[in-house]
Image: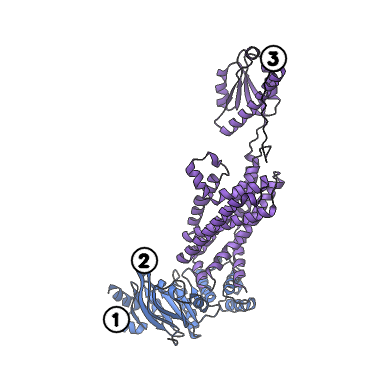
Chain colours: A blue, B purple
Amino acid sequence: MEEHVIFTDKLTKTFGPFTAVNQISFAVEAGEIFGFLGANGAGKTTALRMLSGLLKPTSGIAMVAGVDVMRHPEQVKRRIGYMSQKFSLYEDLTIRENIRFYGGIYGLSVQTIREKTKKLVDKLELGAHVDELVLRLPLGWRQKLALSVAMLHEPRIVFLDEPTSGVDPLTRRQFWDLIYEAAADGVTLMVTTHYMEEAEYCNRVSMMVDGKIEALDTPGQLKKTYHATSMDEVFRKLARG
Amino acid sequence: MNRFSAFIIKEFRHILRDRRTLLILFGMPMAQVLLFGFVLTNEIKNAAIAIVDPSKDAQSTALIQKLASSGYFRIEKNLEAASQLDPAFKEGKIKLAVVFPPDFARQLDHDGSAPIQLLGDASDPNTATTLINYASNIIQDFSTQRKAEAVLPYQIEVQTHMLYNPELKAVYSFVPGVMTLILMLISAMMTSITIAKEKELGTMEVLLASPLKPIQIILGKTTPYLVLSFINAIIVVLIGVFVFGMPIRGSILLLGLESALYMFVALSLGILISTRAATQQAALFMSALGLLMPTMLLSGFIFPRESMPYVLQALGNIIPATWFNQIIKGVMIKGAGIEVLWFQTCVLGVMAIVFVVLSMRNFKDRL
């Protein structure tokens, strides 16, 4: 169990009579980009929330960075980065103030935050805008900034909940460059999406239908197994059952 | 950097950057106290009245003289018959009419008593009541003087003392009332909106996924508003004292502590609301309807609780403002101490505990 960065066994979440996530089991290795695909309501966000310590699982095992999510959600939170689908930056604060805030709540020192701000701003070429309100930034920039901010405290695992929703394809592509860069540094990324083209960018993909993982493999292998030319086709074949 | 102070700094930035919120936070309390203080006064001077005096004798002339010189009334019309009064009232030219019988002095001399009719324009009931009271007092006074001259065997004289507020100044009740309202407004409404805002923007999810504990998030969101509320309370009291000459007869320390307790209750109510409201709109609506209206209408701030139906009185009992209004009036106007106000204080304390427990439970469940 220890060698996997993320490991689940029969992880389940029910809300009353409704089973949102139904006994999912998988393992993710370091530096992997792992995709959760599925329609809205398939349970991918719920699964992600359990793994990031936001939701208490109903039953099953979930280990993240060697920590039992069920028992020590607070420890899990310290070790992960989290980016929600709304990009989660404060629009009425400047770029610098957003970085300072998120650095602050993850316990980074003032000195570290200052260094990180400079590095991050240089990398994203935001130098001229660092004291502007986030409100004035284009959506694509905000999204990249949100990811960088989520990784400010250098977590080994980052959870991205539909990070590209509402963004045009070109910007989405640029965003994935950032994800690859992080993976190359050994960071494990777990991404939920409902854009099937994005599934192609993942190392491995789990297809969720009605709370269950119906298929889990590399995009290439999945296409071969289901005799499909695109991930979209794979998904349609799966969803039809 | 300390996690918590990073949070507080961010929260103050939100508040200071939002001009509209700032205006609501500081402009409204001041405007309210000043408005309530100056506009809602029960004293009336130089009210226009009409006299119908067919008798025109020494007694009636003397009484009219007395009314006119009181400072409360200005004689707008001298009419011949009561039938002419109706148009005058309708035009709004007069607020009160004093009607004498045709043989006023003769009745007084003969029977020892004579009727006088007072007619008030009760389309404005407060003014009418006040004017009728003024006039009755003056007439009473007049009759007492006459009786003294006639040397009667018995005479009962009523002496009235209005305790704590001899001049019956309305500010004495409005400054505490506005403070009750403002503290509830800022502490409860503002916190519920600001927490709902984080939920609406999706930042709450990120905060919860961070190492911050729920209690730190709640304290981080509420501390700035607690500070601002307290500043506001001080401003309201200062205006009351220096602009309207309100006394603080009790302990200032007690006043501060009780205010802090009340703010704490209001804050926990705000948090409770925010756990139920998904959007800022919903939070605003819930606090306006669920907190502000009852606070204004049922706490005894504007309408006396004694005259409410039993159900509304009972409802008023579960509103924190009702108890705080009694406390603050007690401390400021009557100079009461904790030995008198312990019960009200305990009620607020129990409310605080209940709301905190409820909102902590909900906060964990819902987010």
Please give the residue where the numbered disc 1 appears in the rendered image: A226
On the image, the x and y values in percent for residue B367 come to: 47, 66
Residue drawn at (28%, 73%) of the image: A240
Residue drawn at (57%, 26%) of the image: B91
User: Residue most toward the bottom?
Assistant: A3
Q: Residues within 10 Å of mark 3 (few under 14, many from 20)?
A: few
> A107 or A177: which is nearer to us?
A107
Pointer 1 or 2: first along the chain:
2
Query: What's the amino acid at mark 3?
Result: Ala
- Mark 1–mark 3 distance (CA, rounded to whole Å): 116 Å
Residue B259 position (above or below residue A217): above
Residue A7 position (above or below residue B61): below
Question: Is residue A111 visible to us here?
Answer: yes
> Under tag 2, what secondary structure?
loop
> B118 or B345: which is nearer to us?
B345
Q: Which mark is residue B58?
A: 3
> Which quarter shows the C terminus of chain A?
bottom left
